[in-house]
Amino acid sequence: MAYYGAIEAGGTKFCCAIGNEHGEIVEEWIIPTEHPEKTLQTLIPFFRKHAIEALGVGSFGPICVQKDDPFYGYIMNTPKAEWKHYPFIPELEKQLGVPVSFTTDVNAAALGELTKGAAKGLNSCMYITVGTGIGAGAVVKNELLHGHSHPEMGHILIRQHESDQFAGVCPAHGSCLEGLAAGPAIEKRWGKPAKELAQEESVWALEADYLAQALMQYTLILSPERIIMGGGVMKQKQLFPLIREKLAAYVNDYVDMPPLDTYIVSPGLEDKAGMTGALLLAIEAKRNV
Amino acid sequence: MAYYGAIEAGGTKFCCAIGNEHGEIVEEWIIPTEHPEKTLQTLIPFFRKHAIEALGVGSFGPICVQKDDPFYGYIMNTPKAEWKHYPFIPELEKQLGVPVSFTTDVNAAALGELTKGAAKGLNSCMYITVGTGIGAGAVVKNELLHGHSHPEMGHILIRQHESDQFAGVCPAHGSCLEGLAAGPAIEKRWGKPAKELAQEESVWALEADYLAQALMQYTLILSPERIIMGGGVMKQKQLFPLIREKLAAYVNDYVDMPPLDTYIVSPGLEDKAGMTGALLLAIEAKRNV
């Protein structure tokens, strides 16, 4: 049996796993995100012990994904000062001596869901997480969506309601989607965390409207076959029918969308989408050597 | 010498061409868009005469691009009643007996620019036309952007300025991007066609702002390596520096973009981008048989 490694690298924790060539996770563990050298020191021995064939990483960002860039595989301009410009992937490659493939955490989740989750059998999908931030990744014609860089779809502009005078919490854009609709925005606007507001209809009507506006942009620009919505805020399941209804109103039959209850869905892999995607990247990295 | 056919199918005219295997156009002609059967009757003999190996089509839409859909290759829900649900590509294939590849006019233009124009040597680009409508297409990792359907990027939502009370002209969305910023919107808002407003600074400041908002969304969602802007309205070259400046302000250094004077550019193939892309599709269709 050949083993592969996977890392879902986040700002507060690193979720790590060993999996087999079928993309099945066989062992998992979590370590806190510390100084990069210390973090690597903790995780490298574990991957070495299992003699992994390759490693896949879904990472927090921004990250440099351009293969011809001298900063390829580096964490770029992050507020986490210790990680800024850290040669994350080159270090992993050097220390492990195996191929390492990487993308954003949300792109990895989209790949996981397309291959083994809620978008299985399709050629394209989007994965959007609505939690402490808003991020989204996509697979287009079975390829991860990268271009000059990777998408940062959580920061698109939406139209703020006249009734909503909240200034937004995004340090870069104020009232962009993340600034108006991520968990911290909900908590600051309404004075309580999202999970304590479950019964407040006006909270979710506004939230669904902002997310539906974002989904309209994603639909018109990417035309995905399925949109998978995860993250802490999306645990409020009452959002799904509201988002579908508002999306239909915004699009107004201008473009053909799949039936909305199959178009806008919850993750099929629960919180394992990103890890599964990272594992699939590892398997592909070995195949391409 | 092997010959290939190309059609850029628009609502008022069909631009047709014969080209060689290097993607060079060797002969062109234009016919008016009439009843579909009449239009095909006019163009088929010309392609037959040149014994083309394959045909590529960049078409007005909406069109069905899903290969497993029974309506594959049909013109879909267009306001041009005679063309609605016309089996455009199946008819061309049947009458010509050669492989026919097709996509939207703007996707074809993006492919043309990537292969032989302003984005030559890159792996991804967007082509946006701002004229009687606003449309955009993209190539991602050297593949045309298709998903559930094709993009309709001209209809995204943008934020209208408080000083701009214009209701917008889009029948489906009112004040979407196309509704606020295409040629007919400019003419209706200001009372004159765009080309007669060249000296009016406030016209272009507003136009650049709306287009920069759209480019921010495209950048954050698709992360293209280059954005090519064509169409009648973009003949107002003073728009380019204004758009670049406003895009930089909106993005606010949140994501890395290429240097803006190489990121936002005019077409390299002038008005031949779509035709060149269609010809390249024909060559590829033959290769894939």
Image (cartoon, coloured by chain):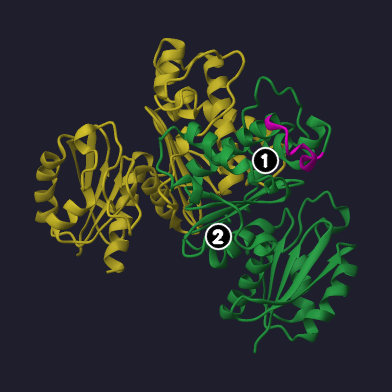
Chain colours: A green, B yellow
Q: Identify residue type, mark 2.
A: Ala
Q: Residue at x 51, y 64 (%)?
A: A120
SS category of the residue bearing label 2: loop
Can residue B266 be seen?
yes
Toward which corner of the image does residue B186 lie, by quadrant?
A: top left
State which quarter of the image contains the N terminus of chain A: bottom right
Q: Could you tell me which chain the residue with mark 2 belongs to?
A: A
- Foreground mark, 1 or 2, reads 2
Q: Residue furthest front?
A: A199
Badge number at residue A155:
1
Can residue A104 be seen?
no
- Of mark 1 and mark 2, the one earlier in the sequence is 2
Q: Could you tell me which chain the residue with mark 1 belongs to?
A: A
Magenta-colored span: A193-201
Q: Residue at x 18, y 57 (%)?
A: B93
Q: Identify residue type, mark 1.
A: His
Q: Is residue A100 left or right of residue A259?
A: right
Name above or below for residue A54 compared with residue B255.
Answer: below
Name above or below for residue A124 compared with residue A219.
Answer: below
Q: Residue at x 34, y 41 (%)?
A: B62
Find residue B55 and report its horizontal and vertical position in percent: 23, 56
Between B121 and A148, the residue placed more toward the observer is: A148
Q: Callout 2 environment at 10 Å: few (<14), some (14 to 19), or many (20+)? A: many
Find residue A95 and report its horizontal and vertical position in percent: 80, 78
State which quarter of the image contains the C terminus of chain A: bottom right
Q: Is residue B132 left or right of residue A262?
A: left
Between B266 and A212, the residue placed more toward the observer is: A212
Badge number at residue A118:
2
Q: Mark 1 to mark 2: distance in Å?
A: 25 Å
Q: Is residue B240 left or right of residue A131?
A: left
Name above or below for residue B266 compared with residue A147.
Answer: above
Toward which corner of the image does residue B159 lie, by quadrant?
A: top right
